[in-house]
Amino acid sequence: MEKKYSVAIYPSNEVIDSVKTMKEYLKSKINWYSSCNSTAHITICEFTIDDAQIDTFKQKLFKTCDTFTPFPIYLDHFSFYENSGAFFIAPNEVSKNNLKPVMKKVQETLKSLKLKKSDDPHLSIGRKLTAENLKIASQLFTTIEIDFLCKEIVLRELDPVKKQFFVIDTFTFNGNVQPEFVQGSLF
């Protein structure tokens, strides 16, 4: 059976709790909105495949993530995409430059799939907000400084009833270098 999956970076529990509080506060001001109940995350990509194939891609994700080394992420400002109505917390330039190669490598690992990719790392507070609600969010949230250690990615599956993703697997960054194959010579 075809299922929708998402690969994402989850921040620390403290950051997840802080973002949940922000989402609840925004919801108290503008009522329900897209992603108001979503756990804080940085999306890497989404895809739909037959669930019988997922184990193959789990193995690929494990192998890729095993080579990554944990690194700090600093989120230091709010921003928004006017065209999609997304209001989010953005990483500083150093963190963004550390996140992009990890995101790209994970996307390359899954390149045989039809991916919906994220190219700009961010942590959404709200999506599909009207122009008016984007303005309200921008007035409510003006400064931020949070950080976490990026040490794993998660694979999530969409619950079609709740329309929320839930974690089905976690892939830790172990810093193991993959030996490169070197063609030897017998003579």
Image (cartoon, rainbow, N blue to C red):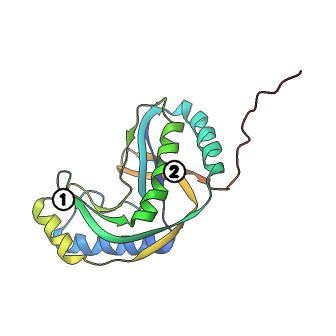
Which of pointers 2 and 1 indicates the residue nearer the eye? 2
Q: Secondary structure at mark 1?
A: loop
Question: Could you tell me residue 30's position as x and y percent?
Answer: 17, 69
Residue at image coords 61%, 49%: 65
Q: Is residue 142 above or below residue 121?
A: below
Q: Residue 149's image quarter?
A: bottom right
Between residue 101 and residue 70, name the one nearer to us: 101
Q: Residue 172's image quarter?
A: bottom right
Residue wearing tag 2: 102
Q: Secondary structure at mark 2?
A: helix
Quarter of the image containing the C terminus? top right
Question: Could you tell me residue 42's position as x and y percent?
Answer: 42, 57
**Amino acid type for the residue under numbered disc 2:** Val
Residue wearing tag 1: 129
Question: Could you tell me residue 147's position as x and y percent?
Answer: 47, 73
**Amino acid type for the residue under numbered disc 1:** Leu
Residue at image coords 36%, 59%: 122
Between residue 111 and residue 48, name the one nearer to us: 111
Question: Could you tell me residue 24's position as x and y percent?
Answer: 30, 72
Mark sitting on residue 101: none
